[in-house]
Amino acid sequence: MKILAVIPARYASTRFPGKPLALLGGKPIIDYAYSVASNAGCVEKAVVATDDERIFSHMKETFGEESVMMTSTEHRSGTDRCGEVLRTLEQKGERYDVVINLQGDEPFVQASQLESLASCFEKPETAIATLKTHITSSEELSSPNNVKVVCASNGQALYFSRQAIPYRRGEEFEHWLEEGEYFKHVGIYAFRSEVLKEVCQLPQSTLECSEKLEQLRWLEAGYTIAVRETPCANIGIDTPADLDAAENELKRIKQVL
């Protein structure tokens, strides 16, 4: 099974312009995800997909010409950017069975997470796969910035929401975590290549527009999403304050090592 890892990277972030090239521990944020993906045993090839010359130039100079691809400025999502990379590589004669969409603003992603996603595709019925991790605090559970997921007994996603789900009727919110398990969605996706091409053609759906969650478009269209649990709750960097938190986490990791 040949796996392509694509790392979408935009420079023009509303909350944090230039984020992929912001320094964490002395090197650009984008370098961390690319290094993990390119060295993961399950990944055949890793590519940063960008629409910005500054990111393109940095990747080319640091990791080589094959590490990066310029993509359209018209894409609405990282998924669409992944689809363009796949189509371009296929036009060059390259073939991949699975595409992993890896977030470039999560520098603490681990190769084990990519391996876990890849293993989902040992089952021929798997179309899309993603990850979840335990929620351990009421603050995490109540925050709309933490997307929650509930799954069927076979590990397939039933629904994703910014609200705390499932709702526990008749119980005070502060006791919900004592009464049951809650999971946060870890936003790394993997697609069978043909499925990625298909979902890139789907129009926005009602549920997606309501929750502002792209994966609801796929569920609403009838695709199944396999969900694996990971012990790693990756730290996403959306704002300069998040970068400060990531710096502290990097120092903590170095101290442990």
Image (spheres, rainbow, N blue to C red):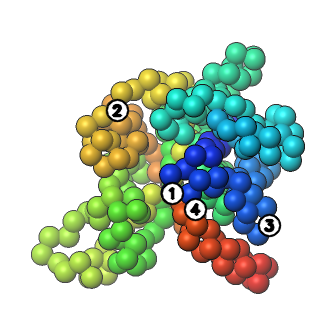
In this image, 216 relative to 69: left or right? left
Residue for badge 3: 26
Residue 190, percent from left and from top: 56, 41
Mark 2 or mark 4: whose residue is earlier in sequence:
2
Residue for badge 2: 204
Residue for badge 1: 15
In this image, 178 relative to 24: left or right? left
**Residue 150 appears in which quarter of the rendering?**
bottom left
In this image, 153 relative to 68: left or right? left
The label number, if any, that marks residue 237 in the structure image: 4
Residue 242, percent from left and from top: 56, 69
The residue that appears at 57% across and 62% down in the rendered structure is 237
- The Cα atoms of the two marked residues, 3 and 2, are separated by 39 Å
- The Cα atoms of the two marked residues, 3 and 1, are separated by 21 Å
| Amino acid beneath label 4 | Ile
Secondary structure of the residue carrying tag 2 is loop
